[in-house]
Each structure stands twice: as C-alpha cells, then as structure tokens.
Image: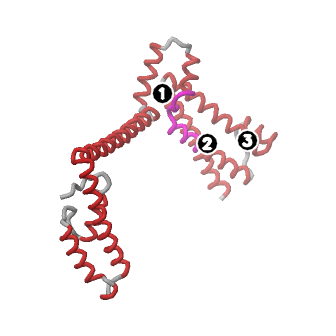
C-alpha cells in the first residue's frame, strides 16, 4: 500500500479521498466502486448536478494520478527518504511555531516594559538614583527621551478637564461674563479669545512638565500634584456650570 506521507501526494490524497468518501488507504478497486456509486447519483445524464459530478470526476482522476505518483516516488526514494522528508517538514513547522511564540513573548515583554506599574517604576527610579553616576538633570532628560512617561492617565484627565474649562469660559464670556483671573483677562483684552486660550494652554503645559519632573524622583508626589490640579480646575468648571445655569439660563 502506498505511503500517504509521500512528499507530494499525501495532502492531495486526503482531500480527494474525502470527496469520494473513501479512506486515504483505500485500494484502487474501492476507489473505482466509490466513483461508480457517486457517478450513478450525480451524473448529469441521470439528473445529477453537472458541477458536483465534475468535482467527483476531478477527484477520481486526481486521486488515482496522485496515488500513482506517490507510489513511484516512494519506490524511487524509498520509505526512509519519504520519512526524512516528512520529518523535515515537521521540523520546519515546529521551528516556525517556535519563532512565532518567541516573537509573541518579546512583544509581551516590550509591552510590559512600555507600561510599567507605578510600584515597578518607583523601584527602577530608586535604583537609578542610588547607582547612577550621571548628573540628575541628565537622568531626567534620559527618562523623557527613552521611555514612556509616568502618570499618563492622570495627565490625560487633567488636560480634558482644562479643555472643558476653556469651553465653559468661552460660553460664559460669549454670554457677557467677565474673566475673573486678572492675568487671563489681560490676555483676553489684548488678544481676544485666542490670547486667552494661549494663556491657559501654556499653564496646562507648564503643570504637565512640572509634574513629570516631580514624578521622575517620586511618582507619588507627582501624582498627588496632578490630582490636586485636576480637582482645582474641576471645581472651577463646576462653578462655571453653576453660573451658566443660575445667571444666564
């Protein structure tokens, strides 16, 4: 019986055998009987479907042809050569799978390195402080240039709250309110609302930079500072909403 694992034939043998509903190890006589049985049902002259019959016909011819080629190849190379070829294919598949797993592992490690926990970040920064010989200013610059910054969630929340504050300020001023902050009011009188936006954005950027610098030495202090800023601006937004409802609506 032909070896199903011959180099070119074993996959096609399985495929065509399924179409004819026979075992891949079936004899030629069994294949002939299966073909005649299916042909008697699906032949177009007998009321069958032409495409289905063509599929059966193709599988029958290809199966016999592939089996013949596999037999010839097995006789030529010998069972040992066929087994070596199949083993090489399995080895390549294992190497490919191992490479994919290694790539996935490296990706996970990279993601973990880019998203450290606050405790891990504190431990790393403490180690840098104890053992680094470079000046402190250089260490700060290195942290900003080579790794993901800490407190990104808190920073995002702070920026969103300030954006809402700018929007509420625009709404209130459009309704006739006066900017209470004298410095912000100065920029508004000199450069209209664009100047006011510029002033507020500069303040937001300055706070973000300061908190990142503080977080480089103590992430808890930087977090507390940023949360306090968010709470302060949030109270201003809440007061603006109250004014909008009570005074202008």
Question: At x 31% / y 69%, what residue is drawn?
Answer: 61
Comes first in the chain, label 1 or label 2: 2
> How would you classify the magenta stretch by its main secondary structure?
helix
Residue with the mark numbered 2: 162
Horizontally, residue 62 falls left or right of residue 190, namely left
All told, the count of numbered labels is 3
Comes first in the chain, label 3 or label 1: 3
Colour convention of the picture = secondary structure
Residue 113 sits in which quadrant?
top left
Task: Identify the image quadrant of the C terminus.
Answer: bottom right
Residue 36 placement (x, y as % from top left): 24, 78
Horizontally, residue 75 falls left or right of residue 172, namely left
Task: Check contact, mark 2 vs mark 3: CB within 8 A.
Answer: no
Residue 232 placement (x, y as % from top left): 57, 38
Vertical order, 69 against 140 (above or below):
below
Question: At x 56% / y 22%, what residue is drawn?
Answer: 140
Residue with the mark numbered 3: 196
Element on which disc 3 rests: helix
Q: Which residues are magenta?
A: 144-161
Nearer to me, 222 or 147? 147
Element on which disc 1 rests: helix
Nearer to me, 181 or 36? 36
Indicate yes or no whether the magenta region holds residue 156. yes
């Amino acid at each position: 019986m032909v070896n199903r694992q011959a180099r070119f034939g074993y996959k096609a043998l399985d495929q065509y055998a399924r179409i004819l509903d026979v075992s891949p190890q079936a004899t030629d006589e069994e294949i002939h009987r299966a073909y005649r049985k299916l042909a008697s049902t699906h032949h177009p002259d007998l009321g069958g479907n032409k495409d289905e019959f063509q599929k059966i016909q193709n599988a029958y011819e290809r199966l016999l042809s592939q089996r013949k080629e596999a037999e010839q190849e097995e006789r030529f190379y010998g069972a040992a050569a066929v087994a070596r070829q199949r083993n090489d294919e399995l080895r390549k598949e294992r190497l490919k799978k191992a490479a994919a797993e290694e790539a996935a592992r490296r990706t996970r490690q990279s993601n973990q390195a880019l998203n450290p926990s606050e405790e891990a970040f504190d431990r790393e920064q403490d180690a840098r402080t104890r053992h680094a010989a470079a000046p402190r200013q250089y260490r700060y610059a290195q942290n900003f240039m080579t790794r993901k910054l800490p407190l990104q969630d808190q920073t995002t929340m702070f920026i969103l709250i300030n954006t809402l504050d700018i929007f509420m300020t625009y709404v209130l001023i459009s309704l006739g309110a006066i900017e209470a902050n004298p410095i912000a009011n100065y920029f508004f009188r000199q450069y209209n609302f664009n100047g006011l936006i510029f002033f507020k954005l500069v303040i937001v950027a300055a706070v973000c930079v300061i908190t990142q610098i503080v977080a480089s030495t103590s992430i808890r202090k930087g977090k507390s500072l940023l949360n306090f800023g968010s709470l302060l601006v949030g109270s201003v937004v809440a007061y603006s909403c109250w004014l909008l409802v009570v005074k202008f609506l």
